[in-house]
Amino acid sequence: EIVLTQSPVTLSLSPGERATLSCRASQSVSSYLAWYQQKPGQAPRLLIYDASNRAAGIPPRFSGSGSGTDFTLTISSLEPEDFVLYYCQQGRSWPLTFGGGTKVEI
Amino acid sequence: EVQLLESGGALVQPGGSLRLSCAASGLTLSRSDMAWVRQAPGKGLEWVSLIRTSGDETHYADSVKGRFTISRDTAKNTLSLQMNGLKAEDTAVYYCAKDRGGGYYDFDQWGQGTLVTVSS
C-alpha cells in the first residue's frame, strides 16, 4: 500500500499570503496524484489531477507540482474561502489512498 | 449538470447489514468507473471500493474486502454498496464518486454523502 504523508497537518496563514502544502508518497506514484479541497459539511472537490492540471472551474491561484514521491499544492494568494481542508490522493495502484489532510487556518 | 445522490444510510447494530444507493442524473453510470469513499467522523478520507465500466472488475480496500459488495444497476442508473458484517469502525459518511476517466483514478464528481452509524 502506498502511504501518503501530508505536511504540515495545520498551516496558519493570513489572507493574501502564499500557502505551500506537501504530499509525500512512500513509493513512486509517477504523476498520478490528485488534490482535493473539502469545506465543512461538504463533499471533497477535485482541484488538481495528474499532479499539475487544474480541474474544471478551479481558479488559477491553485497550482500543483511534483512527480515520483514529492508533490506540492500551492495557493498563490489565499482568499477567505480557502481556509479549509486539503487532501492528496494517489491513483497509481491499489488500494487507492488518501493523505491525512492539511488544514489551512487563519 | 451531473448530480449524484446517495441514500440508505442509517443506524445499524454491529454485525448487521445495510445497502447504500447512489442515483445519478446527467450521467450514465455505466460509462464511468465509480467508487465509494468514506469519512469517519472528524477523520480523513478513505477509499472503499471501485467498479470499472465493464462491471466485471471491482476493487476493495482490505478493511472491507469480503464484507462489502459494489454493484451497478444499468437500467436504474444507480450504484450500490451492500455492506454486511458491519463493525463500529465502519461508521462514516459514505460518498459515491465518479472517476474522471483519465486513465488512472481520481474523482471529479461527488455526492453529498450518506451517514452510516454502527452502534448497539
Image (cartoon, coloured by chain):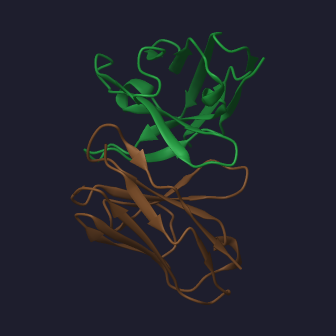
Specify whether B1 is left or right of A40: left
Q: How many marks?
A: 0
Q: Position of residue A89 (x, y in %)?
A: 41, 53
Position of B35 with respect to A14 (left or right) is left
Where residue A78 sits, quadrant-wise, is bottom right
Chain A image colour? brown
Return the residue nearer the eye: B62 or A36: B62
- Residue in view at x 46 percent, y 64 percent: A6
- The chain painted green is B
Quarter placement of the N terminus of chain A: top left
Q: Quadrant of the C terminus of chain A?
A: bottom right
The quadrant holding residue B41 is top right
For image coordinates 69% across by 48% down, the residue present is B42
Q: Identify which residue is drawn at 32% across, 27% down.
A: B52
Q: Position of residue B60 (x, y in %)?
A: 39, 26
User: Relative to A80, does residue B85 appear above or below in the rendering?
Assistant: above
Q: Residue at x 34, y 37 (%)?
A: A95
